[in-house]
Image (cartoon, rainbow, N blue to C red):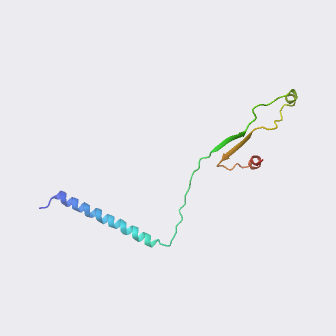
Amino acid sequence: MSNPTTNREVKTSHLLFLMTIGVFVILFVSKSALAGKSAALPVTATVIANARMNTLYQATVLTISSADIDRGYIDVPAGSRFFVNTNQVLQGQRSFLRQ
């Protein structure tokens, strides 16, 4: 008489072998069937908004006269300059950023 455990192991190994052969046949047939054809694959992505600002120049001293106080503002001949880098399009702000 044969051992039931051994028969089960043999059947399992045969089944695994047949499944492996089946996978290779499916891959081979599908590759040759699709040769020369193309397909579209829609892809979506979500990009997180980011911005970075670097100060290029900033005045360290401002002189305020009594005339400036009376007028309510001061003229700064060389104020601050910044560099802004972002991955977002700033609608309506393009002309402001280019000046």
The mark tally for this picture is 0
Q: Nearer the viewer, residue 36 or 61?
A: 61
Residue at (76, 35) in percent of width and height: 59
* Foreground of the two, 76 or 97: 76
Vertical relation: 6 (above or below) 68: below
The residue furthest left is 1
**13 or 77, which is in the foreground?**
77
Q: Position of residue 69 (x, y in %)?
A: 85, 28
Classify residue 43 by image quadrant.
bottom right
Q: Is residue 86 above or below residue 69?
A: below
Residue 83 occupies which quadrant of the picture? top right
Quarter assignment of residue 44? bottom right
The residue located at (33%, 67%) in the rendering is: 21
Say which residue appears at 18% left-offset and 59% top-offset. Answer: 6
Residue 69 horizontal side relative to residue 18, left or right: right
> What x and y, as percent, mark residue 73?
83, 32
Residue located 79% across and 31% down the image: 62
Work out whether 68 lies above or below 3: above
Is residue 34 or residue 77 the one in the foreground?
77
Please state, as top left, top right, bottom left or bottom right, where the N terminus lies in the image.
Answer: bottom left
Q: Is residue 82 left or right of residue 77?
A: left
The picture places residue 77, in percent across and down from the top left corner, at 82, 37
- Residue ranking furthest to the top: 66
